[in-house]
């Protein structure tokens, strides 16, 4: 009997331990399942909130306005007249009559060469002409006298004919002397070198005492550049040729220098007669009065040509336009929701995109925050561009 009681007691203790272990396992399973359900539900709620959250954006209004049609290109300043001065005869420089870089006028004396030899030749030719002119005067008097004597019958007609022949010969001699004198005087003018244009002269390439030769083709004596008016030369793509021709002399030109100075008032003066096949551009020259000499030959400038003004075009800030696989598009805000609108951009000017198709000009477009947007996304307008 005692043995039976001991056996039952041991069995009961073993059963209690098993029950406790099973209970603990069940409690753990139920807890884990509950945690998973709660966590899963919270995650779904978070995802739902993220998906429905409004995205902060900046917007701007599309507008209908008049915008200029312009072409911009790099250019350079070039003088209308640029003359390299060279000697036309062999001589020695006697005087340099200007300061380097000075303003000069057409006809100003710049260099004086040693002209003593040519001056002597001119004097000799003048004396020869004077002698032959005097001989011609005497011959004419002889003809008059002989004519009277022939009329009286005191001399033969042959003598009169000889006198007339002498007059003809001396007349030809006088003409020859005059031509020779004109030639020498022309050569004499080469010894006084005058400015060929009004403008500014560069550095003198010679000094007094320098021997110059007509055959020299190296460094010129000096260079004179006309400063007013002056050219700004630039190249534009060939697609603008017809617009340039249509604008003709009405095309206004503005040049901006490297220091930020802007010079207005230029006009298109010349369009090249052929397109450069290597660059696909055509050469254009604009002319500026340049009275204040702001434009200096050789300097670079950014050129802006206003060809016309387009009336009532639809424009949006250029940052509103995005590029995708289907082309250009903008996000339009309607009732707090972003919608994709495909557009055709004609051109951009001054930070504005001219829309040829896709917008009516009354829409509100997104200008910042587009990367987080999609079709139908709710938006929260934080600011308006330009406000």
Image: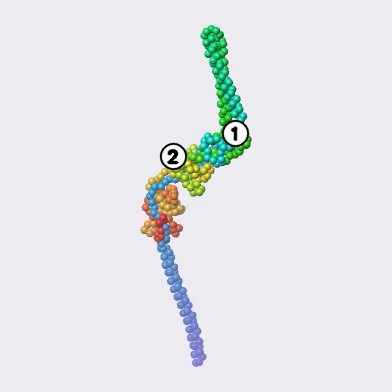
Disc 1 designates what residue?
A: 113
In the image, residue 176 lies at what x, y percent? Answer: 57, 22
Q: Tell me the colour scheme of the image.
A: rainbow
Q: How many marks?
A: 2
- The mark found on residue 249 in the picture is 2
In the image, residue 191 lies at what x, y percent? Answer: 58, 32
Mark 2 vs mark 1, CA separation in Å: 46 Å
In the image, residue 375 lies at what x, y percent? Answer: 41, 57
Q: Residues within 10 Å of mark 2 (few under 14, many from 20)?
A: some
Compared to residue 191, the image places residue 141 above or below, namely above
Q: Secondary structure at mark 2?
A: helix
In the image, residue 237 lies at what x, y percent? Answer: 48, 43
Return the residue nearer the eye: 314 or 41.
314
Q: Secondary structure at mark 1?
A: strand
- The mark found on residue 53 in the picture is none
Q: Earlier in the sequence, mark 2 or mark 1?
A: 1
Instruction: Using the rendered image of the protein, determine whether residue 193 is visible from the camera's viewpoint.
Output: yes
Query: Would you say 97 lies left or right of 289 here?
Result: right
Return the residue nearer the eye: 145 or 233.
145
Compared to residue 209, the image places residue 63 above or below, namely below
Q: Residue at position x 41%, y 47% from top? A: 67
Q: Residue at position x 44%, y 57% from top? A: 368
Q: Report the residue that reaches farthest toward the bottom.
A: 1
Q: Residues within 10 Å of mark 1 (few under 14, many from 20)?
A: many
Q: Are marks 2 and 1 in contact (CB under 8 Å)?
A: no
Return the residue nearer the eye: 293 or 372.
293
The label nearer to you, 2 versus 1, is 1
Instruction: Using the rendered image of the protein, determine whether residue 219 is visible from the camera's viewpoint.
Output: no
Return the residue nearer the eye: 49 or 182.
182
Q: Report the residue that reaches farthest toward the top.
A: 153
- Quadrant of residue 170 within the rendered picture: top right
Q: Which of the image's four quarters has the C terminus?
A: bottom left
């Amino acid at each position: 009997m005692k043995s039976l009681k001991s056996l039952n007691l041991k069995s009961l203790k073993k059963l209690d331990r098993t029950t406790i272990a099973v209970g603990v396992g069940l409690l753990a399973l139920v807890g884990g399942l509950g945690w998973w359900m709660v966590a899963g539900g919270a995650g779904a709620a978070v995802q739902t909130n993220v998906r429905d959250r409004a995205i902060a954006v900046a917007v701007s209004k599309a507008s209908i306005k008049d915008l200029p049609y312009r072409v911009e290109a790099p250019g350079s300043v070039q003088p209308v007249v640029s003359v390299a001065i060279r000697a036309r005869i062999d001589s020695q420089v006697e005087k340099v009559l200007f300061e380097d870089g000075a303003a000069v006028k057409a006809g100003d004396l710049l260099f004086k060469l040693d002209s003593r030899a040519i001056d002597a030749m001119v004097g000799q030719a003048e004396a020869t002409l004077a002698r032959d002119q005097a001989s011609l005067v005497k011959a004419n008097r002889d003809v008059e006298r002989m004519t009277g004597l022939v009329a009286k019958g005191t001399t033969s007609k042959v003598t009169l004919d000889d006198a007339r022949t002498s007059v003809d010969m001396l007349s030809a001699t006088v003409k020859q002397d005059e031509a020779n004198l004109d030639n020498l005087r022309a050569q004499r003018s080469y010894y006084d070198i005058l400015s060929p244009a009004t403008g500014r002269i560069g550095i003198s390439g010679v000094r007094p005492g320098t021997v110059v030769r007509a055959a020299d083709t190296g460094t010129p004596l000096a260079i004179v550049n006309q400063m007013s008016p002056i050219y700004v030369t630039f190249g534009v793509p060939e697609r603008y040729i017809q617009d340039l021709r249509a604008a003709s002399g009405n095309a206004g030109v503005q040049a901006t220098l490297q220091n930020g100075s802007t010079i207005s008032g230029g006009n298109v003066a010349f369009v090249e007669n052929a397109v450069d096949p290597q660059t696909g551009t055509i050469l254009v020259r604009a002319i500026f009065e340049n009275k204040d000499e702001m434009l200096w030959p050789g300097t670079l400038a950014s050129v802006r040509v206003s060809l016309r003004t387009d009336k009532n075009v639809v424009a949006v800030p250029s940052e509103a336009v995005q590029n995708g696989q289907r082309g250009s598009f903008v996000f339009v805000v309607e009732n707090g929701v972003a919608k994709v609108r495909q557009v055709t951009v004609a051109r951009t000017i001054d930070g504005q995109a001219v829309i040829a198709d896709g917008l009516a000009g009354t829409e509100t477009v997104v200008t910042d925050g587009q990367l987080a947007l999609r079709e139908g996304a709710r938006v929260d307008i934080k600011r308006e561009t330009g406000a």
